[in-house]
Amino acid sequence: MPPTSPRPSPDASSDPTTASSDRGNVGIEGYDAVEFWVGNARQAAHFYRSAFGFRLVGYAGPETGVHDRASYVLEQGSIRFVVSGALASDHPIAGHQRRHGDGIRDVAFRVDNAEDTFTTALDRGATPHRKPTVLEDEHGKLVVAAIAVYGDTVHSFVQRQDYSGVYAPGYEPVADDPLASDVGLARIDHAVANVPEGEMDAWSRFYQSVLEFSQLRHFDDEAISTDVTALMSKVLTDERGRIKLPINEPAPGEKRSQIEEYLEAYEGPGIQHLALETDDIVSSVSALRSRGVGFLPVPDEYYADTRQRVGDVDESWADLQQLGILVDRDDEGYLLQIFTEPVQDRPTIFFEIIQRQGSQGFGVGNFRALFEAIEGAQRRRGNL
């Protein structure tokens, strides 16, 4: 079994209302970047460019005066990925990759004041990872700090209103990417974490008391289950509603759930998947499929039941069925979603492509079909 992640400190696990007298010091504005630590950054960056349509905009490495790693900055819409690889075996990136495989190290938030956010988080029980650091070059000043969260994951706080460079000091811009071909991915919708059984509530309280998030949704094991596996999930969101962080934990079931498979393969808790929002999911998924991106299969009978349940949608049901796109409706509207296969050899990180047509939910009506598809993939790997 994977090692248990450190629990949030007692202060951070206390009543979320304890932070209410100190509101306004966190100042989170939205996602800044998601950084992947990988075994070969050049190849990983090429994959996200050629398969997912990201544009290479910046680079740091020996040629730019950075001698311990190579990092590539990729953008599409408002989404920014940073893909980093070590240049020596004793570098922390190399150790992280040996344990976890390619994984997400940092879900970074843009903030008004990195020092204030960091200090407030520590006062409320967070564990420091990087003290506020001022980075400067000819493009201005960048301030960065970071706290540790579940497993080896961190949240950086990035203050960049006084910085005009491509990403950070040490990075040089890439003027023209010959692979650049946008597939319509516009923004990060949510980032999902998997933690061991019994830790979901503690981490939920952590985000509420330390970073002033609130609980948006709670799904118990009755809502998220099949005949043989189950999990539970809580969805946290920041005050402005720009960041959504679901936290999953396994629930008792007849067989090993997808969360347990992830925790074993990743050797601990971490980010399971990123949901990337598009305004035209049919076009985006068509482009991704044409580039070789694999998606979880959906049986044809799903569409007969779903079309009755959901009713009329703006998209062609024939297109949705051909592409394997799931549909769900709630009181606010409907959403469309589809999930890739894992994007590395270990069954860990995958992506969700999502389009919201009013609905702010998470496709609860699709949970059973989705998890049966995931179980099918687990079965083929011999891990169910």
Image (cartoon, helix red, strand yellow):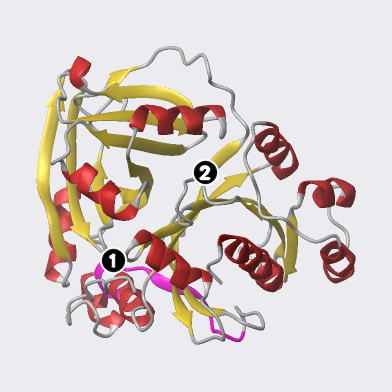
Which range of residues does the magenta coloring cover? 209-222
Say if the magenta span includes residue 31.
no
Name the residue rendered at 90%, 65% in the picture.
Answer: 304
Q: Is residue 12 left or right of residue 261?
A: left
* Disc 2: which residue: 187
Residue type at mark 1: give it.
Tyr
Residue type at mark 2: give it.
Arg
Count of number-bearing discs: 2
Name the residue rendered at 28%, 66% in the picture.
Answer: 150
Where residue 180 appears, as percent x and y from the top left, is 53, 21
* Disc 1: which residue: 150
For the N terminus, the quadrant is bottom left
Q: Nearer the viewer, residue 185 or 299?
A: 299
Q: Is residue 16 left or right of residue 311?
A: left
Packing grade of label 1 (10 A; few <14, some 14-19, many >=20) is: many
User: Is residue 339 positioned above or below 76 on the image?
Assistant: below
Residue 12 shows up from this direction: yes
**Between disc 1 and disc 2, whose residue precedes?**
1
